Image (cartoon, rainbow, N blue to C red):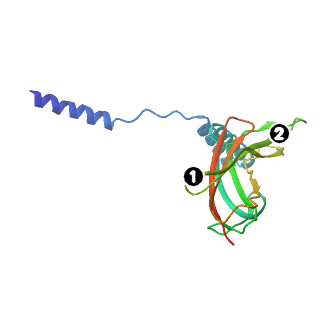
Amino acid sequence: MPIQFQTWGYIVAAAMTLAPAPPATAGPIADKAAQAEALLDKGDAAGALDLLGEATAIAWQAAPLIIRKALFVEESSGYGIYVERPTPAIYKPGEKIRAYVEPLGFGYGRNAVGGKEIGFDVDFRLTDPDGKELFSRDNFVEVGSPVRYDNREFNLSIAVDLSGLPQGDYIAHFLLRDQNSDKSAGFELPFSVRE
């Protein structure tokens, strides 16, 4: 008899495993995507893109602060407009290091005249490869920009003058703190100083 019971238990477990799952409820992002697809089918591409923008905004607000890209550059003049420094990054004594950074998930604030703005406070630490702290400063630099819309293509360009730093290997640690939310994210970039 116990064998029959065990067999019956396996059959019930198998039947439960093969039973279809209840339908998933769509969330606001999926709802916006479905509405956008319907508009696109009707030839309203602008309306579809607006709805997809709303869906992206929902995900954006829910996301933590993310560093999409962080690298050393020779120069930068805007979002995605930079000349990458060859890696490994080697600087001459007295040469400034320049970091290009693309954050995601940041908040939007209001400036003194009521317009929107994006802003970050940046903390900086310099360590050797073993983690020994050589320099540290909170609020090392403040970076921000007024914006007309909830721009998502935003970059920071951070220059650090390390004059007097002896030859050797180092790690630059940056912490971005969003001025318009409680979000923060850090990144680190190794570099060397050589003649």
Residue 135, percent from left and from top: 68, 50
Residue 46, percent from left and from top: 75, 48
Q: Mark 2 = which residue?
A: 116
The number of numbered discs placed on residues in the rendered structure image is 2
Q: Amino acid at mark 2?
A: Lys
Q: Residue at x 26, y 36 (%)?
A: 14
Badge 1 crowding class, 10 Å Cα cut-off, few under 14, some 14 to 19, many 20 or more, is few
- Residue 25 in the figure: left or right of residue 150: left
Q: Amino acid at mark 1?
A: Gly
Q: SS for tag 2?
A: strand
Q: Residue at x 72, y 63 (%)?
A: 73
Q: Which mark is residue 92?
A: none
Observer-nearest residue: 73 or 159? Answer: 159
Residue 5, percent from left and from top: 15, 28
- Residue 6 in the figure: left or right of residue 81: left
Quarter of image, res 19? top left
Q: Mark 1 = which residue?
A: 131
* N-terminal-most mark, 2 or 1: 2
Residue 72, percent from left and from top: 69, 61
